Image (spheres, rainbow, N blue to C red):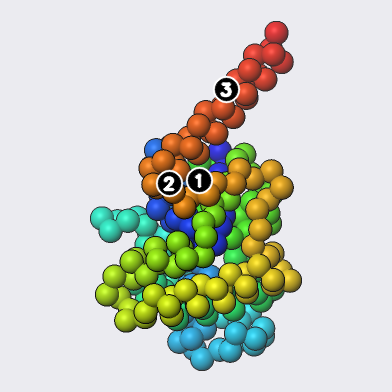
Amino acid sequence: MVITIDGPAGAGKTTVSRGLADRLGYRYIDTGALYRGVALAARKKRIATDDDIGLEALCRDLRLRFIRNADGCRLYDGDDDIEDQIRTPEMSMLASAISARSVVRRFLLDVQRQFGREKGAVFEGRDMGTVVFPDADLKFFLEAPLEVRARRRHRELNGRSDQSLDGVLKDMQRRDHNDQTRVLAPLKPAADAVVINSENLTADAVVERMMMEIKMLEAKLRNHGSTEGS
């Protein structure tokens, strides 16, 4: 199957997506990392987030790929491991601005769909079920209140940033607004997505909830196949 998990920052998408992919033996694709990769390259080359000509040329030269090693699945640009560089509050905000540019979205749309052609993958992002894979076998949308998500993200930073909890909350609030109000692919659940509120659930509990939906779909497909064969 192709399974999508969308939702705002701090809802638990990364942990849950990795856990679900491990349970299924699927590949895990963090599409948000791809936007961060473009954002990092743009900052290094001093390309403004509204410079579409510069961004288009930049995207043509990028060689973004995921490589799994002992530390998990890490993003590379060519031979350079950029995973640690993209996991900062600055890159979060820059990626949000970059993701609103149509030239970047077109480039990464092709990249993401290439990953999906082989099936057997869990795609984490913000528009996976609405834009990138509208025909995905199963779509999930993970949500939680802003304050809960901010506390989670602040704990995740764990020494990598001296940003206060209030600073994290305000950044997340701005990013939510940017993601939800952008003209191109705004953040929202797909019409046929299974919406899960993770506020009072552990990551394992969310994965179990998703596995229940997957098993129900598999049973439905088996029954449909046996009906057609009879």
Secondary structure at numbered mark 2:
loop
Instruction: Return the disc, 1 or 3, that comes first in the chain's sequence.
Output: 1
Q: Is residue 155 above or below residue 96?
A: above
| Residue found 41% across the figure and 41% down from its top | 205
Q: CA distance from mark 1 to mark 3?
A: 20 Å
Query: Quarter of the image holding residue 152?
Result: bottom left
Residue 138 at x, y percent in the picture: 60, 40
Q: Is residue 32 visible?
A: no
Residue 201 is marked as 2
Residue in the foreground of this view, choosing between 91 and 68: 91
**Where is mark 1, residue-wise?**
121
| Residue found 55% across the figure and 73% down from its top | 173
| Residue found 62% across the figure and 39% down from its top | 137
Where, quadrant-wise, is the C terminus in this rendering?
top right
**What crowding class fits label 3: few (fewer than 14 Cα within 10 Å), some (14-19), or many (20 or more)?**
few
Query: Quarter of the image holding residue 96?
Result: bottom right
The residue at the far top in this view is 230
2 or 3: mark nearer the eye: 2
Q: Is residue 144 visible?
A: yes
Q: Is residue 1 above or below residue 170?
A: above
